Each structure stands twice: as structure tokens, then as C-alpha cells.
Image (cartoon, rainbow, N blue to C red):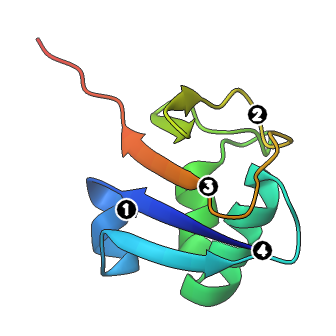
Amino acid sequence: MAVTVRVYGVLRSILGESRLEVSLSGSSVGDLIDELAAKYGDKIKQELLDEDGSLDCAYLFFVGGEPVHGLSQGLENGDEVVITTMIAGG
């Protein structure tokens, strides 16, 4: 299965690109993060997950334009996953 991943902010710096085509053996957002960590290093996992191993609330994940609420969220072949940082103002 393959998905397209678009990233913004600090993730673009970590991954070195803003758009990725990722082949997955699994079918969840957690599997995607594992695949990104295997390819780009554990820093990506440390960035995207909190101390409990859940999605870090500093990031927003969308699949097909819909928000993701957890690592078990399913993915399908051809899905587009967008990962962006929360924006805060003062």
C-alpha cells in the first residue's frame, strides 16, 4: 500500500522534503509513523508522539481532509496524509 504524505514546518526540515510517497506494510497512522522513523530516524517519532506514545497535540493530522484522532486510524491505498504544526498567536 502507498500513501502520499505532505508535511509542514519543522517536519519539513527533519524530513528534507515537503511531499513524500510512502509504501506501507501496515494500514494505520501508527504504521505510517513507524515507517517514517525507519526511513528518516527516530527523531521523527520523538517529534510526532508524546511521552505516552500517543499523537502529540502540537501536531494536526488529516487523512483525506478529515482530522485524525489516534494512531489506530486506518489508511487506504492512495490516501493523502497531511501533518502540520499547531499555530498559536499571542
Labels 4, 2: front one = 4
Q: How far from the left and from the top, in percent, is residue 77?
A: 73, 64
Residue count near mark 3 (Cα–Cα under 10 Å), binned few <14, some 14–19, many ≥20: some
The numbered mark, 1 or 2, whose residue comes first in the sequence reads 1
Q: Nearer the viewer, residue 51 or 1?
A: 1
Horizontal side, residue 35 vs residue 60: left or right: right
Amino acid type, label 2? Gly
Q: How many marks?
A: 4
- Disc 3 secondary structure class: loop
Amino acid type, label 3? Asp
How far apart are the two marked residues, 4 and 2, measured between alpha carbons?
A: 20 Å
CB-based contact (under 8 Å), mark 4 and mark 2: no
The numbered mark, 1 or 4, whose residue comes first in the sequence reads 4
Q: How far from the left and from the top, in percent, is residue 2?
A: 68, 74
- Disc 2 secondary structure class: loop
How far apart are the two marked residues, 4 and 3, measured between alpha carbons?
A: 10 Å
Amino acid type, label 4? Met
The residue under label 1 is 11
- Residue positioned 31% across, 81% down in the render: 16
The dot on residue 70 is: 2
How far apart are the two marked residues, 3 and 1, measured between alpha carbons?
A: 19 Å
How far apart are the two marked residues, 3 and 2, measured between alpha carbons?
A: 16 Å
- Residue positioned 52% across, 56% down in the render: 47
Residue farthest toward the left in the current orientation of the protein: 90
* Quadrant for the N terminus in the image: bottom right
- Residue positioned 11% across, 11% down in the render: 90
Horizontal side, residue 88 vs residue 27: left or right: left
The residue under label 4 is 1
Amino acid type, label 1? Leu
How far apart are the two marked residues, 1 and 4, measured between alpha carbons?
A: 23 Å
- Residue positioned 77% across, 76% down in the render: 24
The residue under label 3 is 79
